[in-house]
Image: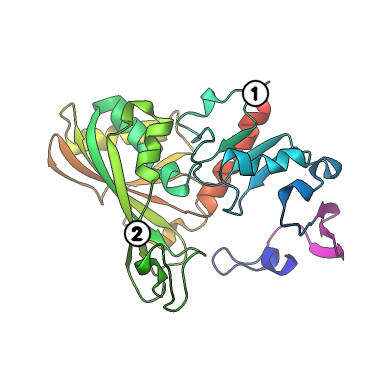
Amino acid sequence: MTYMFKYDSVHGPWKHHELKVKDEKTLLFGEKPVAVYGFRNPEEIPWAASGAEYVVESTGVFTDKDKAAAHLKGGAKKVVISAPSKDAPMFVVGVNEKEYKSDLNIVSNASCTTNCLAPLAKVINDRFGIVEGLMTTVHSITATQKTVDGPSAKDWRGGRAASFNIIPSSTGAAKAVGKVLPALNGKLTGMAFRVPTVDVSVVDLTVRLAKEATYDEIKAAIKEESEGKLKGILGYTEDDVVSTDFVGDSRSSIFDAKAGIALSKNFVKLVSWYDNEWGYSSRVIDLIVHMASVA
């Protein structure tokens, strides 16, 4: 655990307080002790005794309400699932977090891709209306993929070597937008390509607009929102950027004005980058802060 905190192949070494081991169950971040547990069953983790009120469920295993509720039995007050959930209320900061109510004890922060797509889709739908659309995410390697070819019964292509292939895959990110933006429910779907990069992904959103708009008008609308209500969530760039330029970017979605194209005033392709690690983690923290502010 200490080693993994100290060193990261993408984000570099830990640059903050000194990190050391106090004993077999405690890490010290500077002078602040942090308890470490190794229980397989979340119910056994003494969250209350540790003083932990908010738990981030990021194992990828306990993603529905019943399973995530095990943390509550251990004394936690709130659980934030860092993945899509089939039944937990889903929130995307900058899009629908204001709908959170204090009686909700288990929530989902959606996926990194939904966090990129939803703010962009919200701006476009609010300004011009989305009739329908398709999304493709070109997504960096994740830990669930294999370093060399191996069996993957649920998805044969997903078992192929991650560092040597562009791998088509499924994603529920576009459909999930309908959960946080009900006006778009049933209007979006999408897919993914897993590619041999270690961090930063990009969304390609192709939509048919209800209201005619030039590409310049669309760019202006996104730029305005990125400097206003969605500042810090939605970004805007006209620079000639590539994926590594966004490593460590805390924004959920950075619109690439030069990468998009328009076929007509009703049919456009929009491109937006996201650090699927750093940006998403930042939104998890933002959601917890918001939850704590709601009485």
Q: Which residue is mark 1?
A: 103
Question: Where in the figure is residue 102, as x and y percent of width and height?
Answer: 64, 23
Query: What is the magenta range?
Result: 14-35
Q: Which residue is at 86% across, 43% downward?
A: 49
Left/right of residue 151 with respect to residue 167 in the rendered view: right
Q: Residue furthest top?
A: 295
Mark 1 and mark 2 residues within 8 Å of each other at the beta carbon: no
Seen in the picture, residue 209 relative to 254 is either above or below; the reply is above
Question: Where in the figure is residue 108, as x and y percent of width and height?
Answer: 55, 39
Distance in Å between CA atoms under marks 1 and 2: 36 Å
Left/right of residue 272 with respect to residue 96 in the rendered view: left
Q: Quadrant of the N terminus?
A: bottom right
Q: Amino acid at mark 2?
A: Ser
Q: Which residue is mark 2?
A: 169
Q: Which residue is at 48% across, 58% downward?
A: 247
Q: Quadrant of the C terminus?
A: top right
Q: Nearer the viewer, residue 44 or 271?
A: 44
Seen in the picture, residue 11 relative to 33 is either above or below; the reply is below
Q: Residue furthest bottom?
A: 148
Q: Nearer the viewer, residue 114 or 9?
A: 114
Left/right of residue 80 with respect to residue 155 in the rendered view: right
Give the quarter of the image for residue 117. top left
In this view of the protein, can residue 151 be seen by the observer? yes
Q: Nearer the viewer, residue 125 or 89?
A: 89
Q: Residue furthest right?
A: 23
In this view of the protein, can residue 204 be seen by the observer? no
Q: Which residue is at 44% across, 79% downward?
A: 148
Q: Amino acid at mark 1?
A: Asp
Question: Where in the figure is residue 183, as x and y percent of width and height?
Answer: 33, 26
SS type, badge 2: strand
